[in-house]
């Protein structure tokens, strides 16, 4: 297998292995295995670990951004692609490789739509992880062997793509809308002007392709993202 066979052009991410890496997985043994794998194939200055999304966000928010994140999708405080989206918003341009036991085409596609720069099955060898890092350093998106690009866009894929286009602040406001809060309450919670909230709500509805707040909430619920949006400290 070559990375070129499983990658597509994306924004260049030079020197991925020159900074520190973050491994996010709630299984200690697999965390240890990933640490050893990364140590053997790259020259990271440090490899840190987190066992859930909230812990990972604390790590990302308390220091310089990592140069690479490895993320398991099945975490106790995340569902589906929600953890990936939250991390993507919080970690700016840091590339994220999803490392998962789920290898079906739909899951891989949704991960890419949600912002993953690579997808490596958990059973992969060290060589595959090396190929994934090399591909990302060339500005490519790494996809596993056997992945078949679909020409059909599902409704869930479409809403994931729309949700992933929201800014941190828009995502936070949408989260509060899902909690049933009005613009005045949202403005108070986020300490911003109510006119600013109204402008964000208009932009959110445009991005989601809906005509009302109710439709926006339903779209989020359909994608099972009601609790997947950034927390106040990660909103900018």
Image (cartoon, rainbow, N blue to C red):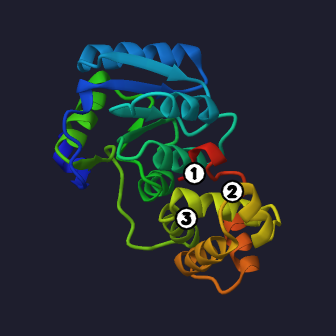
Rendered position, 104 above or below 121: below
- Measured in 3D between alpha carbons, the distance from the residue under mark 2 to the one under mark 1, in whole angstroms, is 9 Å
Secondary structure beneath disc 3?
helix
Residue placed most toward the observer, 17 or 101: 17
- Tell me whether circle 2 and circle 3 mark residues in contact (CB < 8 Å): no
- Tell me whether circle 2 and circle 1 mark residues in contact (CB < 8 Å): yes
Q: Which residue is mark 1?
A: 235
Q: Which residue is mark 3?
A: 163
Secondary structure beneath disc 2?
helix
Q: Residues within 10 Å of mark 1 (few under 14, many from 20)?
A: some
Left or right position of 111 against 133: right
Rendered position, 235 above or below 2: below
| Earlier residue among tags 1 and 3 | 3
Residue placed most toward the observer, 153 or 137: 137
Number of the front mark, 2 or 1: 2
Number of the front mark, 2 or 3: 2
Q: Position of residue 32 (x, y in %)?
A: 47, 13
Q: Position of residue 216 (x, y in %)?
A: 68, 74
Q: Position of residue 112 (x, y in %)?
A: 41, 54
Left or right position of 194 against 169: right
Decide if residue 6 is in sight here. Answer: yes
Image mark for residue 94:
none
Q: Which residue is mark 2?
A: 190
């Amino acid at each position: 297998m070559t990375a070129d066979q499983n990658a597509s052009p994306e924004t260049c991410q030079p020197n991925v292995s020159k900074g520190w890496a973050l491994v996010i997985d709630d299984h200690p043994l697999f965390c240890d295995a990933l640490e050893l794998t990364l140590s053997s194939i790259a020259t990271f200055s440090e490899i840190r670990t987190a066992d859930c999304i909230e812990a990972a966000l604390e790590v990302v928010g308390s220091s310089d951004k990592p140069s690479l994140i490895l993320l398991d999708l099945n975490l106790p405080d995340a569902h589906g692609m929600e953890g990936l989206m939250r991390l993507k918003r919080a970690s700016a341009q840091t590339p994220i490789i999803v490392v998962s036991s789920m290898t079906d085409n739909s899951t891989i596609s949704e991960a890419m739509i949600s912002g993953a720069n690579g997808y490596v099955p958990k059973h992969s060898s060290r060589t595959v992880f090396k190929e994934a890092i090399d591909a990302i350093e060339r500005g490519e998106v790494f996809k596993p062997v056997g992945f078949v690009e679909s020409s059909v866009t599902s409704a869930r894929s479409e809403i994931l793509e729309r949700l992933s286009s929201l800014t941190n602040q828009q995502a936070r406001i949408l989260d509060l809308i899902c909690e049933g809060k009005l613009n005045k309450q949202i403005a108070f919670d986020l300490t911003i002007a109510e006119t600013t909230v109204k402008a964000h709500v208009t932009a959110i509805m445009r991005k989601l392709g809906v005509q009302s707040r109710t439709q926006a909430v339903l779209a989020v619920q359909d994608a099972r993202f009601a609790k997947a949006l950034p927390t106040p400290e990660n909103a900018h």
